[in-house]
Image: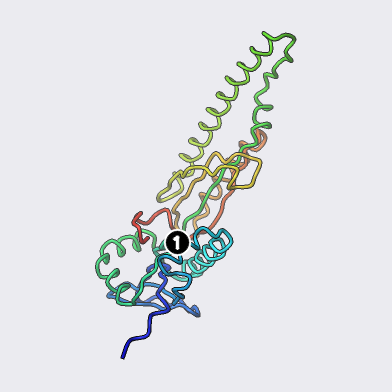
Amino acid sequence: MIAAPETTAWYVYGVVDASAKIGADQLRLIGEGPLAAVVSEVPLSEFGEEELAQRLNDRAWLEEHARAHEDVLQRLAAVAAVVPFRFGAIYRELDDVSVLLRERRGELSAALERVRGRIELGVKAWADRDRFEAALGDALPEPSSGRAYLERRRTEHERAGRVGAQLGDIARDAHARLLRHAVEGVANRPHPRELTGRDEAMILNGAYLVADGDEALAGEAAALDAEHGARGIAFEVTGPWPPHNFVEPRDEV
């Protein structure tokens, strides 16, 4: 008898302790020794190799499923230590998932201990450049001649450079201050306005691993906001998030 073609595969969200109680419908724990992968069954019509490559170009589909992926990880992180996997970790057989857990047991166990009892918080700093420049003073005179116009353009260019340098200094100082209240931290590349949809420029895109329940980092962010707010710089705390920034950057994780 010819076997029926496979129509489903297994989507891996992350790894938890084998003893974890996740209590979530549509999710399964695939245990291997002290670890377990959190998986769900997905259709190959969407998550097959070629199908997924095509779907990734569908922005609406990608946003919907990436959000669902993060929602699952958020629920897991609320009840257990979790090593989050990136969106789109697909395995054809459950045995393949077990092999993953066996082959990477040491690495995954270390990552799990690294984030146990800890959460990831984000801190973003937003700069209203017009307000920041206005707070600096030094209004530029209106040009009265062609030469004056060129001089003004040169001065504007130099001033923009100084403003950018000062904003960079503020972001670096803020990151250093926030790190004092974190186990680990990373300053990721700020997102451009095209992605944020905001008029303000993102000057800090920090992620920080902190002990669950520790509010010191949020307090430092509030202090930074009060310190710089009058100059058009706002600090925003986000999260808690699954600790994506603090697990090893391997293809499957």
Q: Is residue 16 above or below residue 184?
A: below
Query: Element under label 1?
Result: helix
| Nearest to the observer: residue 160 or residue 136 | 160
Horizontal and vertical percent for residue 60? 59, 61
Horizontal and vertical percent for residue 87? 45, 62
* Colour treatment of the image: rainbow
Quadrant that contains the C terminus: bottom left
Q: How dense is the environment of label 1, judged by Cα within 10 Å: few (below 14), some, or many (20 and up)?
A: few
| Nearest to the observer: residue 234 or residue 164 | 164
Q: For residue 135, which quarter of the picture?
A: top right
Quadrant that contains the N terminus: bottom left
Horizontal and vertical percent for residue 13? 43, 68
- For the point 43% across and 47% down, the residue is 185
Q: Is residue 72 left or right of residue 229?
A: left
Q: For residue 59, which quarter of the picture?
A: bottom right
| Nearest to the observer: residue 235 or residue 32 | 32
Q: Is residue 60 above or below residue 135?
A: below
Q: Amino acid at mark 1?
A: Ala
| Residue furthest to the bottom | 1
Q: Is residue 128 left or right of residue 66?
A: right
| Residue furthest to the front | 2
Q: Is residue 205 above or below residue 116?
A: above
- For the point 57% across and 19% down, the residue is 158
Q: Is residue 11 above or below residue 193?
A: below
| Residue identified by numbered label 1 | 53
Horizontal and vertical percent for residue 246? 39, 54
Q: For residue 234, which quarter of the picture?
A: top right
Q: Is residue 128 left or right of residue 111?
A: right
Q: Is residue 209 left or right of residue 252?
A: right
- For the point 29% across and 75% down, the residue is 32
Q: How many marks?
A: 1
| Nearest to the observer: residue 212 or residue 39 | 39
